[in-house]
Image (cartoon, helix red, strand yellow):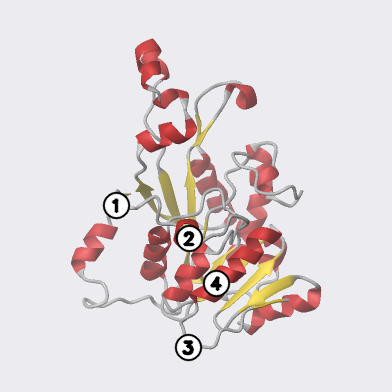
Amino acid sequence: MSAWIEFKAKGIDQARGEDWTLINGDCVEVVREMPANSVDLSIYSPPFASLYTYSASDRDMGNCRTHDEFFEHYRFLLAHLLDATKPGRNMCVHCMDLPTSKSRDGYVGLSDFPGEIIRSAENAGWIWHSKVTIWKDPVTAMQRTKALGLLHKQLKKDSCMSRMGIPDYVLTFRKPGENPFPVAHTDETFPVSLWQKWASPIWDDIDPSDTLQFRSAREEEDEKHICPLQLEVIRRCVRLWSNPSDVVASPFAGIGSEGVVSIEEGRRYVGVELKRSYYEQAARNLAAAEPKGRGKQMSLL
């Protein structure tokens, strides 16, 4: 991972262990400096445009005022990440359709955020490779969000405003070119019964509570991430599209979910996180994920 250690000399804080590097900085600037053709797989959940506020930084894509502004910034990341990725290798993006509001958008409905991601990635040179729908319980969503379209009382008032729940998606894109290091599986490591399950376009067996935030023994003062990605979703992408010792990257590291799974699966990891408190929590999570007896060497620099 020495290629990323050079960021320390540029005044960018980082933490690292034996098989991981975490950088506290702007993902566009950091990914731009990554060596060409050095990343085997990237997996991340980008800020959902303006749906959530993660930090007060002007560099935070989650603080964009409009979707157009978000994608104006996001396209730079897509281009730099394409350069950093090896030919024939993949990028996995976790996303969802975004609900609109009358106060912010002038109408109640949905915005095709995944479709905009697809178009932006294709414009940047990526090949749209795959899409899987992750089922979410509409009752849980109703209880958490009180969304008008999911309320039973709305059904009795005017069902034209009623709608189905909003699933998650994982969109996978591939860099053009011949993969120099094929990811080959065997009947023993990847039996056909498992492939038939994972090849389904709908994953209806993902536990919504299977997140790093839920797994960790958290103290009250620990930083909480708004919508951490389920660990099993990350695990499937990592196992399916990377080899042991491959470099897995996440430009939106959050509290380190993608990195923890990557380390557990025997991969190397490089992550970038803008928010300082997330970065510090991610560093602790990554250090804790290293196998016992390996000699943890996590340091906040």
Name the residue type under label 4.
Leu
Name the residue type under label 2.
Leu
Q: Are marks 3 and 1 in contact (CB under 8 Å)?
A: no
- Crowding at dot 3, Cα within 10 Å, few <14 / some 14-19 / many 20+, comes out as few
Q: Is residue 13 left or right of residue 228?
A: right
- Crowding at dot 1, Cα within 10 Å, few <14 / some 14-19 / many 20+, comes out as few
| Mark closer to the observer (1, 4) | 4
Name the residue type under label 1.
Asp
- Percent x, y for residue 23? 67, 69
| Label of residue 205 in the image | 1
**Mark sitting earlier along the chain (3/2):** 2
**Mark sitting earlier along the chain (3/1):** 1
Q: CA distance from mark 3 to mark 1?
A: 34 Å
Q: CA distance from mark 1 to mark 4?
A: 26 Å
User: Which quadrant: the N terminus?
Assistant: bottom right
Q: Which residue is mark 2?
A: 212
User: Which quadrant: the C terminus?
Assistant: bottom right
Taking the spot 67% from the left edge, 55% from the top edge, the residue there is 76
| Mark closer to the observer (2, 1) | 2
Taking 192 as reference, is 298 above or below it?
A: below
Instruction: Find numbered disc 1 in the image and state the secondary structure of the residue it sits on.
Output: loop
Q: Is residue 151 left or right of residue 294?
A: left
Q: Which residue is mark 4?
A: 286
Residue 218 visible from this viewpoint: yes
**Mark sitting earlier along the chain (1/4):** 1
Q: Which residue is mark 3?
A: 293
Q: CA distance from mark 4 to mark 3?
A: 15 Å
- Percent x, y for residue 154? 40, 17
